[in-house]
Image: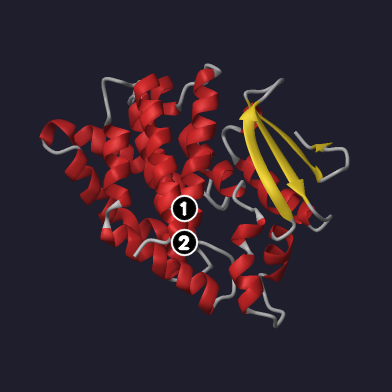
């Protein structure tokens, strides 16, 4: 059963993707059909839930489940929209390998499934995510893009989605704009809500605590159109420990991302001047 937070995020995502399809690719509603399939797919739900159980209950880490993956998707759609409006093309568009709709679809898939490998464990979870979700991605694409006439399109979208999945930790090189969006969107989910469960359930010090405590200091992460660069990211925090999240989690992901040159980044404690990083 879905949590109330998941249901709220589902509605936000449907509306956001619907608006983007209507604005940028009205002739092709594939991203919306794909999103609906993912939101109602029992296997996707099962792997997200179990990944979160392993992450929080077994390992004592923060949220890596259905809420986190939806937030990453929401972030990715926001960044993609801002970049598209600023005239930045996706890799598929630049190369002529696919459409904006195909890029959206790959990003949605990668966002929703990138942390599935936490169901196996933390180490190399990005690679396990690809292994665990390959067949699921294939089945979903065959359902929303049936027939031999769509073979090439299915291969391109699934390959791009897998690049985003295995590249989201910045441990494996990525080369597409689409995969770069996943890196940054994942790094932007670091507010206190992501750490709440583990902070309440585990008081004994252990590996992963710095991520929980630093995330608990992050009040908000805003993604907006930039002034000097297309994308403006602004991190507000209640304490200095929040800088750990910015400097050790978000910034390395931005630097490793193919969209780093399009981002301006500010961070600071509420009530004080913001520090500009990028």
Does the rendering let one see residue 58?
Answer: yes
Position of residue 111 in the picture relative to residue 185 (left or right): left
Q: Residue at x 50, y 30 (%)?
A: 80
Residue 84: x and y in percent read: 49, 22
Q: Are marks 2 and 1 in contact (CB under 8 Å)?
A: yes
Q: Secondary structure under badge 1?
A: helix
Q: Nearer the viewer, residue 20 or 231?
A: 20
Which residue is more in the foreground, 274 or 121? 274
Residue bearing the label numbered 2: 65
Q: Which residue is mark 1?
A: 69
Q: Is residue 35 above or below residue 69?
A: above
Question: Which residue does the image show at 54% across and 33% down from the upper left?
Answer: 79
25 or 99: nearer the viewer: 25
The location of residue 172, given as percent across then percent down, is: 53, 50
Which residue reaches farthest top? 87
Quarter of image, res 51? bottom left
């Amino acid at each position: 059963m879905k949590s109330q937070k998941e249901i709220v995020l589902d509605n936000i995502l449907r509306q956001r993707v619907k608006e983007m399809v209507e604005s940028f690719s009205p002739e092709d509603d594939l991203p919306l059909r794909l999103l609906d399939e993912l939101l109602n797919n029992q296997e996707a739900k099962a792997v997200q839930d179990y990944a979160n159980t392993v992450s929080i209950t077994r390992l004592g880490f923060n949220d890596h489940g259905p809420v986190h993956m939806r937030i990453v998707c929401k972030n990715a759609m926001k960044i993609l929209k801002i970049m598209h409006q600023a005239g930045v093309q996706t890799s598929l568009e630049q190369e002529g390998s696919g459409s904006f709709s195909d890029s959206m679809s790959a990003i949605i898939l990668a966002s929703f499934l990138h942390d599935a490998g936490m169901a196996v464990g933390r180490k190399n979870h990005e690679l396990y995510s690809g292994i665990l979700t390959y067949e699921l991605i294939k089945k979903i694409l065959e359902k929303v893009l049936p027939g031999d006439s769509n073979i090439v399109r299915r291969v391109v979208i699934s390959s791009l989605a897998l690049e985003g999945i295995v590249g989201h930790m910045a441990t494996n090189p990525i080369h597409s704009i689409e995969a770069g969006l996943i890196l940054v969107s994942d790094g932007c989910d670091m507010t206190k809500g992501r750490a709440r469960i583990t902070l309440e359930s585990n008081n004994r010090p252990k590996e992963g605590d710095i991520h929980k405590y630093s995330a608990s200091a992050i009040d908000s992460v805003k993604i907006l159109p930039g002034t000097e660069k297309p994308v403006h990211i602004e991190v507000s925090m209640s304490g200095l420990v929040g800088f750990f999240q910015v400097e050790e989690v978000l910034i390395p992901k931005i630097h490793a991302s193919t969209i780093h040159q399009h981002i301006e980044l500010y961070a600071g404690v509420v009530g004080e001047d913001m520090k500009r990083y990028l």
